[in-house]
Amino acid sequence: MQKMKFNVKAENQGLAITAKAGKHQVVLDEGAQMGGKDTGPNPMQNVLASLASCENVTAHVVAKEIGFDLQALSFNITGVFDPRGFMGDRSVRPYFEEIAVEVKVTTTESQARIATLQAEVESRCPVYTLLKAADVKLIDKWESA
């Protein structure tokens, strides 16, 4: 399999950025408290959305491979971030300290099979493994819906 290459082009308007990825467009911004106009999610929220999306895609690929009855997934993801690092305190890292991932799986499969799916997703999902490599504490709970 060939390596994949991704490209995003982006232009800013104040704190907002319009990113173009192929034929798609995403607007990211900051809320008024940070000086933005709240025209889209902030970059940290976008990371959490990317994690949900990536785990979803990975779960569907894995489910097909292992014959898992995957009907639907519902994500509730919360990240803990200390803004002091972003504001210049070098003793605090400027990214998530911890992310809690709660996944409700609509399936006829057992909790043991859900755990198998979860383990495969967490070992193969590019966004999840990127966060894990950055030493973000990941707290995961996958259960039947």
Image (cartoon, rainbow, N blue to C red):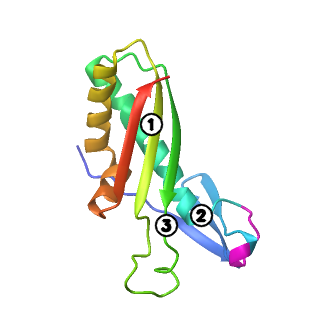
**Quarter of the image with the N terminus in it:** top left
- Mark 2 sits on what residue? 19
Percent x, y for residue 26?
Answer: 62, 57
Position of 44 compared to 137: left or right? Answer: right
Residue at image location 49% in from the left, 51% down from the top = 50
Distance from disc 2 to disc 3, alpha carbons, whole Å, reads: 24 Å
- Mark 1 sits on what residue? 56
Residue at image location 43% in from the left, 54% down from the top = 99
| Viewer-side residue, 46 vs 75 | 75
Q: Specify the amino acid type for callout 2.
A: Ala
User: Does the magenta segment cover residue 35?
Assistant: yes
Percent x, y for residue 5?
Answer: 36, 57
Magenta stretch, main secondary structure class: loop
Nearest to N terminus: mark 1 or mark 2: 2
Point out the stretch of residues depicted in magenta: 33-39
Q: Secondary structure at mark 1?
A: helix
Q: Secondary structure at mark 2?
A: strand
Position of 108 compared to 36: left or right? Answer: left
Q: Secondary structure at mark 3?
A: loop
Q: Would you identify the image quadrant in which residue 119 lies?
A: top left
